[in-house]
Image (cartoon, grey):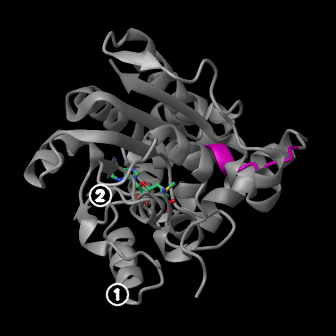
Amino acid sequence: MKKYHQSVLLKESIGYLNVKKGERFIDATAGGGGHTFEILRLGGKVLAIDRDPKSIEHIKKKVKSQKSKVKSIEELVLVVGNFNQVGEIARKNGFGKVDGILFDLGVSSYQLEEAQRGFSFQKSGPLDMRMDPKLTINAADIVNNFNQRRLNEIFKKFGQEKFSWPIANAIIRARQIKSFETTEELANVAREVYRKFKVQTNIDPATKVFQSLRIVINSELLNLEEALPQTVNLLKNNGRLVIISFHSLEDAIVKRFFKENKKLKVLTKSPIGPENWEILQNPRSRSAKLRAAQKI
Ligand SMILES: C[S@@+](CC[C@H](N)C(=O)[O-])C[C@H]1O[C@@H](n2cnc3c(N)ncnc32)[C@H](O)[C@@H]1O
């Protein structure tokens, strides 16, 4: 079976959580369960939340098949939910006061690589990009219906795409002939614009367009802004908050929150990144930034 997700900054994040036997933790982004299982292995109790039902299903299966190699599985509570409700979910599940909370933001490798989920510009799939299948708007709705000004705004603001306007323009022209249905069709439009401007990049020209749509469809920045203030009340004194982000827009929110919150002492003067061996082993870790704080 292919690995669901390769955990990023595992040793570092678990180190900052300072897990001790019998303590309680919230993993707000369960994904493939890598961080959750490590906390369990160290004797912690975990409330693991993910908005993608596939993630929770995967962890359940792993527990059943005993692949997790964790003995104290009764210490695990799994919830499908959005971390913007973390306060309510925690209290409902007996995790109203915890020793640590982890957010490992963004998407899992499973979500990225499963063509049917529509996150991938490397494989053709339906233009979807919803982490939560109950969301009503997907990528095709935006690409086929938003006007050029709004598309430009999305690509510029959430993707920092310098060709946002010509890409938005190319989308409008292409959809007059045929609506967009697949990730490949959209990726090719971005690639064509880069070719036209004779720009060489070491990342796929579709990267930023896809990132920006994903952020908007899943309200990623808003969810983070809503979740962070709830964490402080959930933490016991000396409890730790550890956040791994993958792009500057997320990191800026975390940095500001840590700086402005009087109840938090920042433990990471500057953000922690992956070591070279981790980047070599898992190139997706290259943009990861970990920030940690302690409740005082
Ligand atoms: C990078 S993965 C986490 C990987 C996990 N730490 C591991 O080691 O396997 C991020 C996960 O967060 C989930 N996620 C993103 N936004 C979320 C939100 N607002 N609420 C709950 N889960 C969210 C995604 O569905 C995805 O499964």
Q: Residue at x 52, y 61 (%)?
A: 108
Is the C-beta of the residue carrying label 1 under 8 Å from the nearest atom of ligand 1?
no
Residue 173 makes an appearance in the image: no
Instruction: Label 1: state its secondary structure.
Output: helix
Quarter residue 140 falls in = bottom left
Q: Nearer the viewer, mark 2 or mark 1?
A: 2
Q: Main secondary structure of the magenta part?
A: loop
In the image, what residue type sits under mark 2?
A: Lys
Q: Is residue 280 above or below residue 296?
A: below
The part of the chain drawn in magenta is 201-208
Residues packed near mark 1 inside 10 Å, few (<14), some (14 to 19) or many (20 plus): few
**Residue annotated with mark 2:** 45
Q: Residue at x 42, y 75 (%)?
A: 70
Residue 208 position within the rendered picture, expressed as x and y whole percent measured from the top left = 64, 43
In the image, what residue type sits under mark 1?
A: Lys
**Residue annotated with mark 1:** 64
Q: Is residue 64 above or below residue 290?
A: below
Q: Residue at x 54, y 28 (%)?
A: 251
Examine the structure image and report whether residue 137 is included in the region drawn in magenta.
no
Quote the CA–CA distance across marks 2 and 1.
18 Å
Given the current orientation, which residue lies at the most extreme left position? Answer: 92
Q: Nearer the viewer, residue 148 or 46?
A: 46
In what quadrant does ligand 1 lie? bottom left
In the rendered image, the quadrant that contains the C terminus is top left
Q: Residue at x 12, y 52 (%)?
A: 94
Q: Is residue 273 left or right of residue 197?
A: left
Quarter residue 230 falls in = top left
Is the C-beta of the residue carrying label 2 under 8 Å from the nearest atom of ligand 1?
no
In the rendered image, the quadrant that contains the N terminus is bottom right
Instruction: Label 2: state its secondary structure.
Output: strand
